[in-house]
Amino acid sequence: MSRRRQIYEGKAKILYEGPEPGTIIQYFKDDATAFNAEKKGTINGKGVINNRISEHIFTLLGHIGIPSHFIRRLNMREQLVKQVEIVPIEVIVRNVAAGSLSKRLGIEEGTPLPHTLLEYCYKDDALGDPLVAEEHIACFGWASQEEMQDISAMAIRINDFMAGMFAGIGIKLVDFKLEFGRVFEGDFSRIILADEISPDGCRLWDIKTNEKLDKDRFRRDLGGEAEAYQEVARRLGLFPEGESEVLDLNSERKKRGK
Ligand code: TMP
Ligand code: ASP
């Protein structure tokens, strides 16, 4: 048996060459980082949960006509996706002030925003993914104006869908990060949603208590991060009873007799 070829190892995922040209396998790790990888750790079972949550959300987004790289989940930690050329922009969608927005502009965390705010960061680890304006994106050619129109329109539709989906399970969608990629068809390319959508890249607060159910538990040393990710999956109706022993987290718990 030949070992498949690793294409790239990121902070939370490893990419392998897929079975057919133009495909990639995304492997979800339990590794967690924050503050541009200054802080490192692991969240037990995170890879399994994020693989499943991301599959669920990309599949539902597909139903409302959002094109994405997702093809199918292969196993507990891997999914098959289309190979894309990643647009080097992180798209941040915000409904409620939190995190870097609160810090930068002195707006108290939890303040609802008058309308959804889109922000763009240039993907460059060495620079710490700096916030940029659409003018920078056009000036340096990171994406064309037409591509940015597609990206912003999709980001708003994704937010509308996800905010409703999470509200239905008692979760406030505070903010989240999206990444997009280009697929080439002859002389043309089009933009599709890529990467993942999971509690790693979203702020998710319980609607009643404002309890954080996302990676801020790790970033801010609040503890209980694995349980929070699992709670999001549970509320989404993933990992029904009988399947949950596959989570490392649960087997760890059983071992501890909890
Ligand atoms: P921020 O408030 O730290 O800018 O984060 C905004 C949202 O984007 C939050 O839901 C977390 C997510 N995010 C990532 O997914 N990756 C990142 O590198 C950063 C900085 C934020
Ligand atoms: N994932 C990012 C990092 O490690 C930052 C974050 O999610 O807070 O740099």
Image (cartoon, helix red, strand yellow):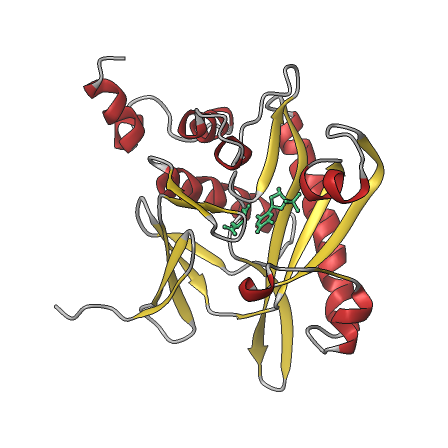
| One can see residue 146 in this view | no
Residue 189 position in % (x across, y down)? 63, 77
The N terminus - image quarter: bottom left
Quick one: which residue is furthest to the bottom in this view? 187
Residue at image x 77%, y 30%? 108
Q: Residue at x 80, y 34 (%)?
A: 107
Q: Which is more toward the observer, 143 or 131?
A: 131
Q: Position of residue 147 (x, y in %)?
A: 72, 69
| Residue shown at the point (43%, 73%) measured from the top left | 22
220 left or right of 117?
A: left
Residue 216 placement, left or right of 98: left
- Horizontal side of residue 241 vs 175, given as left or right: left
Measured as percent of width and height from the top left, residue 12 is found at: 42, 51
In this rendering, is residue 161 above or below 3?
above
Residue 190, quarter of the rendered image? bottom right
52 on left or right of 196: left
Q: Quadrant of the C terminus?
A: top left
Q: What residue appears at the point 24 percent right and 68 percent down from the top-left corner?
A: 4
Residue 156 appears in the rendering: yes
Residue 81 vs 141, above or below: the answer is above
Residue positioned most to the left: 1
